[in-house]
Amino acid sequence: MEIDKAVRESTDGRLRTKYEHAVYVIQRAFALYEFEEVAFSFNGGKDSTVLLHLLRAGYYLHKEDATFCNGNQLDCKLNCPIRTIYFESPCAFPEINSFTYDTASLYGLPLEIIRSDFKSGLEALLKEKPTRAIFLGTRIGDPNAVGQEQFSPSSIGWPPFMRVNPILDWSYRDVWSFILTCKVKYCSLYDQGYTSIGSIHDTIPNTLLRVHDSSSPGKFKPAYMLLDGRLERAGRAKKTSPKCEDNFVLSNGLNNVDLNQGGSCMASIIFVGDEILFGTVENKLEMELCKKLHNIGWQVTHIAVVRNEIDSVAEEVERRKSTDDMVFILGGLGPLHSDVSVAGVAKAFGVRLAPDEEFEEYLAQLIGNSYTGDRNEMALLPEGVTELLHHKMLPVPLIKCSNVIILAATNVPELETQWDCLLELPDTHLVRMAPFASKHLSTMLYDAETARVISKLCMDFPDICIGCHRKSRIGPFIISFTGKDKSRVELAAERLSHSFQEGAFSEAEGG
């Protein structure tokens, strides 16, 4: 069979491994279900084109014996007459429609066309022709791929069938490596610079493939020349999240005060972890990261701890990235089911997760080859917004998505190392500003005795954060003054001391 032969003769070891695994999934499905009970969802795109030829190869290998072929080897090599579902949309590119029909004719695919909305059309089709499994060209970075595996039951509310995803773990590079190695036909739009094809209303050629030549204006390189697969969907129109209307700054009791005055940037910190919310783990990184931000003149406006849920992370990130200069995320990073930080960030930016081969190589060096599945999942990063922050002191680059940085630290020494690396890197936007000056006064006076004076100071010194706390119920009352102007901090503290009898206040160490 020409597909099987082309891949096995290829020098691309990665492609051979991906191919063998995909074909195994296909053969497994053919062994589990009667051929009449399975279908193939084809949309004319590159992923489903790859799946078509994998199905041909898997079908051939599954039924390779001569008795099945009835002596007709040609039919076995060319055709896999699987029921093929095609959703014909008025918003589809004409090139997609023509390629789909031509391909179906060439390979003898019996098309079952849906012209209504996909869900109701599929329900009607499966009532007419009971179907137990449908092959899909879903890849792990696709928006609907979250939580799916090679064999995944259909979602709640949909007709029951098994989704079979043979190329779930394939990357953009894998797809094009297969197409070019096997020399199979694909939709002509991919030669015009389209790298991910949706509808005519949300898809344009990928500008990263534009030919910068005055003699060839408006021309694009073919899709397989895109070097960074993370930018596959850069030609898709992205939905932008509305700006958070709750656009205020928390400032320790100060209302309507812009602490950015005097040269300060705003940062928020998000911790991801049920273990923190349940009180089973002490969060020691919070104070350390706050200190480090204050030391470079940044104001921490918000600290949140959220559950190990994609939606919880996404909601918090979306809210903070719109209001702060930088968002730092700790926790929820790794191969476990609870490690949802990266997926949450992707959802907050309205992009999908896509395999990052460069990041995968770093992970392979770190954890070896014994955790292939976990490694692949950990190498899925938000598409089109991710930048890897490299530093010689880091075994794996840190992940930066626009103004969101995901820190991999699990303890204070690791945070120290990662923070030092961030400050040395040129493109993190962690600008060193004038540090905050602080002064802390201690008194044994009651809160009620000082409340009116402190309230008056807040009005007289709107540029100073004035915070109050006790270390214990019977311990001293600590008043902290923090601001960018050291002389103003000193003046505010002096004003408080002079408002009471001499000796009522003394200077405290670090609050």
Image: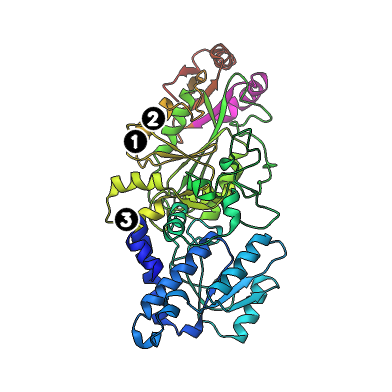
| Residue 265 higher or lower than 434, as above or below | below
Do the residues under discs 3 and 2 have CB atoms within 8 angstroms?
A: no
Q: Which of 277 and 248 is in front in this view?
A: 248
Q: Magenta region: which residues?
A: 444-469
Question: On the image, numbered disc 1 is attached to which residue?
Answer: 394
On screen, residue 171 versus residue 237, left or right, reads: left
Q: Nearer the viewer, residue 371 or 304?
A: 371
Residue 247: % across, % down: 67, 37
Instruction: Give residue 411's quadrant in the image.
Output: top left
Question: On the image, numbered disc 2 is attached to which residue?
Answer: 421
Task: Please name the amino acid that badge 2 sits on.
Answer: Cys
Q: Distance between the residues labelled 1 and 2?
A: 8 Å
Residue 120: % across, % down: 67, 75
> Residue at position x 53%, y 58% from top?
142
Q: Which colour scheme is used?
A: rainbow
> Residue at position x 49%, y 53% from top?
307
Inspect the magenta stretch and tell me whether residue 464 lies in it: yes
Question: On the image, numbered disc 3 is attached to which residue?
Answer: 13
Mark 1 vs mark 3: in front = 3
